Amino acid sequence: MLYLIILLAFVLLIAGFEMLLVLGIPALATKTVFYGSMPDVAFIQKTLGGINHTTLLAIPFFIFAAQLMGSGQIAKRLTGLVKVLVGHTRGGMGYTVIGGSMAFGSVSGSAPATVAAMGRMVYPEMRSAGFTEKFSLGLLVASAETALLIPPSITFIIYGWMTGSSIARLFAGGLAVGLVLGIAFAILVKLEAMRSGIASSEKTRLAEKLKAVKDAGWSLGMPAIILGGIYGGFVTPTEAAAVSVVYAIFVEAFIYKNLSFGKLVELTERSAISTATIFILLAMGGVLAFFVTLAQVPTQISEFLAAINAGPITFLLVVNVCFLIAGMFIDPNSALLILVPPLFPVATALGIDPIHFGMIVTLNIGMGMITPPFGLDIFVASSTLNKPVMSIIKGVWPFVVANIIVLMIITYVPSISLFIPNLIFGP
C-alpha cells in the first residue's frame, strides 16, 4: 500500500497536477484497492471530519487579519516604527526589513503575505540605501520566513492540529527560534554593509522616535492583544485570531480611516479564496495521513531505525534532509501534511519533545519557501516586485546557508526551543 501511495504521488507531481490531486488521488486509490469494503460515505466523512476541528478556525481569521493589515496602515506603521528605531545605523534598512518582517509576521502568521507587504514598502529604500539588487531581493524573501516562527503562525496551528500539540506552547517556542534566525540574517546584513561601504545616517532624534511610537500606537495594540491575550491566559489562539480581525477592522476603518466597505468586501473575498485552498489541502492530506497510519508506516520506520541502531541524532538529520528535498519541489503545507504523520510518532518514540520537533519542522518549512527551484516566496516576490525569478534565486543562497546553520543549532540544542514554553507554562 505504501508503494502505491508513493508511486502515484510522485507520478502526479512530475506530471504537474495540482497538490490537492497529488494528495487526494493516492488516498482514493488506496481506499479503492486495499479498503474496497469501506463505504463511500465513510470515506467522505473521514475526509471532511479531519478538518472539523475548532483549532483550525484560527486559520481563516489570521488570513483575514493579514489581508486587512497588509493593505492598510497597521503594517506600514509597524514597519515605520522599526525604521525610526534602527534605520539610522550602518545597514539600518537591512535591519528594518528583518524587524519589519517580524513585526508583520506577529500580526499575520503568513510568509507570502509578509513578502508581498514588505516588498512594496521597503525594497526601493533598500536600493537607495546602497544595498545591491541581489542582496535586497534575497533579504526580503528570507526575512519573511520569520513570519512562520514569530507567533501567530498558521504553520504552528496546522502542526498543532495534526499532532495534538499545544499551540500556545508552539507559539512561545517560535519566539526564541524566530529571534535566532533574525539574528543570523542581521549578521549577514552587517557583513554586506561593511563589504559595500554603506555608511550610517544621521541619528534619529528623540522627538522623531516618540512621534513614531505615537503613530504606531494602535498598530502595536495588535501583537499586544494576540500575544498578551494568549500568554496571559485570557484567550485561546482561536479566540485571539477572531479578536485580531475585529480589532483590525476597527483600527483601519475608524482610526486610520483607510478601509471602505467596498475594500472590506474585496479583502473578504481574497481571504475566502486563500482559506478554501488551505482547507482543501488539509482535507486531502488528512485522509492520506489516515491511510499512511493504517499502513503502519511509523512502525516500519521505527523498526528500520532500531535495526541500524540509529538514535535521535541520526533520525533528526534524516528529517531535515527529507524536508529540504520536499521543500524544493512542493508547497510548504503539502510537505507538512505528507511528512509529519509518519515522522511524528517516531520522534515521540525516540523521546523528542513535540514542541522541539515542531520548531525543527517549521524551520524546515520556512527554508523550503525560499529554496529553489520552487520556493513559494520567490515567486511571490517576483510577482510583487516585477523582478525575474533568477535574480531572486541568486540573492537567496547566503540566506539558505545561514538557515541551514540555524537549523542545525535548533535541531541539536533543544533548550533554545523549549526555554520560553517551559518558562511560561512550566516543563
Image: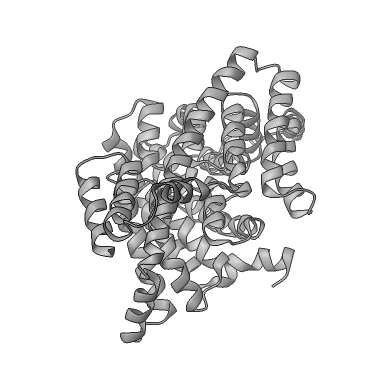
> How far across and down, in percent of the image, does residue 193 sit?
45, 45
> How far across and down, in percent of the image, does residue 319 sit?
38, 66
- Looking at this view, is 234 or 292 the one in front? 292
Image quadrant assignment for residue 420: bottom right
Quadrant of the rendering where the C terminus is positioned: bottom right
Is any atom of residue 151 visible in this view?
no
Is any atom of residue 289 visible in this view?
yes
> How far across and down, in percent of the image, does residue 96 sit?
56, 39
Quadrant of the rendering where the N terminus is positioned: bottom left
- Looking at this view, is 251 or 62 the one in front? 62
- Looking at this view, is 32 or 280 the one in front? 32
Q: Residue at x 52, y 51 (%)?
A: 158
Q: Residue at x 60, y 12 (%)?
A: 262
247 up-or-down from 403: above or below: above
Q: Residue at x 56, y 54 (%)?
A: 161
Drawn side of residue 344 relative to residue 166, left or right: left
Please count the marks in the image. 0
Tell me, what colour scheme is on the image? one colour
> How far across and down, in percent of the image, does residue 417 sit?
58, 65
292 up-or-down from 204: above or below: below
Drawn side of residue 235 relative to residue 60, left or right: right
